[in-house]
Image: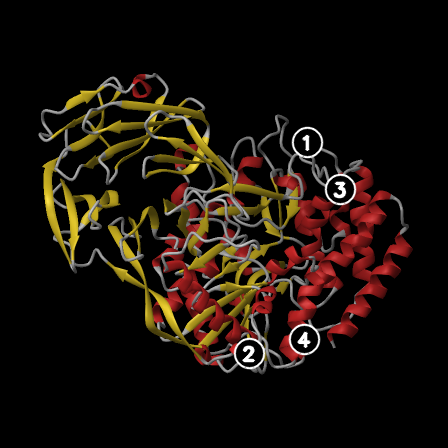
Amino acid sequence: MKKILEKFLAVTLSVSLLAVLPSCGTTASDSTSVSGQASEVTDSSTSLVDDTQSTSEAVGAYIQESMSDNMPDTYTRFYDLRVSQDGKVQLVGMNTSGKIQLLQQEASDWTVLAECDVPANATSYLSMSEDGTLWAIIQDEEGQYSLCTGTDSNALDAVQVDALSQSEALPVELRVNNDGTVFMVIQVGESTVFVVVNSSTQQVTTITPGFYGSPVFYSDGAVYAFIAGSTNLNTFDAENGNMLQQYQLAISSPLARACAATVKDNTLTWSDSDGIHQIALGGSIQQTFADNRSFALASSDFIQQQLVIDSEGSYWISGTNASGQAVVYRYRFDPTATTSADNELVVWAMEDSFLLREALNEYAAAHPEQTVTVEYGSDSLDGGMTTDDVIRTLNVEIFAGEGPDVLVLDGLPVESYISQGVLADLSSIDTSGCYDNIVNCYQDDTGRWALPLLFRPCIMYCQSEENASKLSAAKSLTDLQDLLCVKNDFHYDGYYNLFSELYPSASASIFAQGAQSVNEDALREFLTVTKAVVDAQNITEEYDPLFGDGEDTVSGDDGQHLAVDIPVSMNWYGRSQDPADCAAGSPSDYLLTYIYMVSETQTVPALVCPMPGNVFVPVLTMGVLESSEQKESGIEFIQTMLGCETEEVAGRGSFNGYFVRQGIQLAKASQKNDASTGTPTPAELDLDSVMEQLTTPANTSTSLRELVYEEAAKLYTGSQDLETTLANILQRANLYYAEQS
């Protein structure tokens, strides 16, 4: 794999150079994606090059330059970013004194061209023309918006904009462009209204095309708007509002809300957390560059606002950092920059992860001398490969000594790797302040061979004292059968949902750690109990009709995609009936929500405790290959990941589990709870005590889980009896173990 990646890195850096040449709008018939230093790559990409192109040192790379370090002041925000008619970059921002300033870059310095006070009742939508004329959206005491302009912030003149005067009007954006036009985006009910104002004549052009998503922008006399949730881009004439053209872009998914975009020379350019991307309008080749993990673009702390391209072909992106300070970066191609493929750290994961991205950015920033590459196995699934195929391919590379340096072990045969000496000892990682029972779950007398950074507890809880005594006395899944079989308003509506909640705790017995064989008794018990629940609750669907496959997709305030594994028995919203008294499962984040919302009274449950076996699901389990030439760097990378577990990070999203750093997320949950609501606090629930009782990691092999479910589903539907199901699973699992050895 190392040799393959070296070849790929060399060719992609050279191809990235095309993005800054004047011919950036050229197209080709085949669609492909190319990227530069510290990029995300897939195995399929390696077919672009042959052995003759291999090199240990690639020349030419994008560099990031902070252009806000030498400004005359610090700025709380930038309202506008543009390139003037004579090719100079201009910024409109508010300084620490509360003044609105128009800045212009001159060589390596910034000059203040104009300055004024913030007008009374001004919203956050304002800008300034090159001659110092202020444009601002004002909101009066009755909540009415209006567009105002003038050189004296205390005596502005109103410009009649009908869209702003409507009762449902909500301004979204205001920009002043380099040709002097003023561009606004206004949401009116379910319609997105674009307004273009000629700053000289104050002529207003209104375009009301429907509902459009982000980004929306003006460039060279045209308005560019993405249809919400699609890859379709419509363009409108800024003078008369007529539609000019519709484009169906050859990109895999809609642009993210948290991105900046522009059009220049008939080429769309946008930036997001993965780098800077380009595609010619009407073309089929997407280029990706400036995707170094040390760049601010990769950080969730950097909120992007605008993107422009200067006269030299460099990319300027404005936004705010973690401290709320306005910043602007320039991304410039440096043909003399070198990157050494011999000093490359390769991280492999089946799926993307918010916490992984945080660590990649932080580690790369601390190690500019090293190239950091992350590969996602799931990318190969798009090419027709199955999950088992991806894992087999990875295993071949590992045992051939050509594997990555760092592995996210979720779904992989962790125990097989440990028994065969594939993984390096992680004992040197400082885990002080963590749940020792969790971080040491893959430790023996000789070392610590893997380290989970997240975990999900397999728990049960109930509200009544009567059922609490039954649950607390339960020593096996069979002891829970009667309670699980009770059909109530919070029952399992799909047997996949039932399987997903009960399998993790059972897997620790069925496929016991280090056993490399199947515990037939434990398997029989799991199949018997789950089949009994299916029959008792009359479950006929594979998935819950309301919650699909158990993955509820929501969007957080930070714009991140959150996939929350929801135990159906614990779901409270969308159902009008009384909640269940008790439930069992393996929830991910927001455990408190599950517990107190199921209770009508929102009182402390009578019982919250681990399921029989004290099992937890290790998540984002990290390992370093013993054969890696970057072993020490890999260990340091995992230490960096552990250091990213902070309250600040915990407040930005769900990570499909709890941090192993003790108390972080529980403390965050405590901050969110208002005592006046009656919501139980983490202390009242004694959740730390629950976490500390967990002793046994679930088996996390995706292959074993899938084969068990495939056979169990036949049992649940009645197409296969228990003994046949049992025999088929035993046979397939034994083949799996033989293959791993």
Q: Identify the secondary structure beneath mark 4.
A: helix
At x 16% / y 33%, what residue is drawn?
134
Judge by depth and name the residue closer to the eye, 369 or 18. Answer: 18
Classify the position of the N terminus by image quarter: bottom right
Residue annotated with mark 1? 489
Q: Which mark is residue 737?
A: none
Report the mark closest to the observer, 3 or 2: 2
Q: Earlier in the sequence, mark 3 or mark 4?
A: 4
Q: Amino acid at mark 2?
A: Lys
Residue 437 visible in rendering: no
Task: Out of 198 and 377, give the one closest to the viewer.
Answer: 198
Q: Nearer the viewer, mark 4 or mark 1?
A: 4
Alpha-carbon distance for marks 3 and 4? 34 Å
Q: CA distance from mark 4 to mark 1?
A: 49 Å
Depth check, front residue: 361 or 240: 240
Q: Residue at x 56, y 50 (%)?
A: 588
Residue 3 tag number: 2
Pointers 4 and 1 in contact (C-beta within 8 Å): no
Q: Which mark is residue 542?
A: 3
* SS at badge 2: helix
Image location (x, y in percent) of residue 334: 32, 68
Q: Callout 3: helix, strand or loop? A: loop
Crowd around label 1: few <14 · some 14–19 · many ≥20 (10 Å): some
Is tag 4's residue or tag 1's residue first in the polypeptide sequence? 4
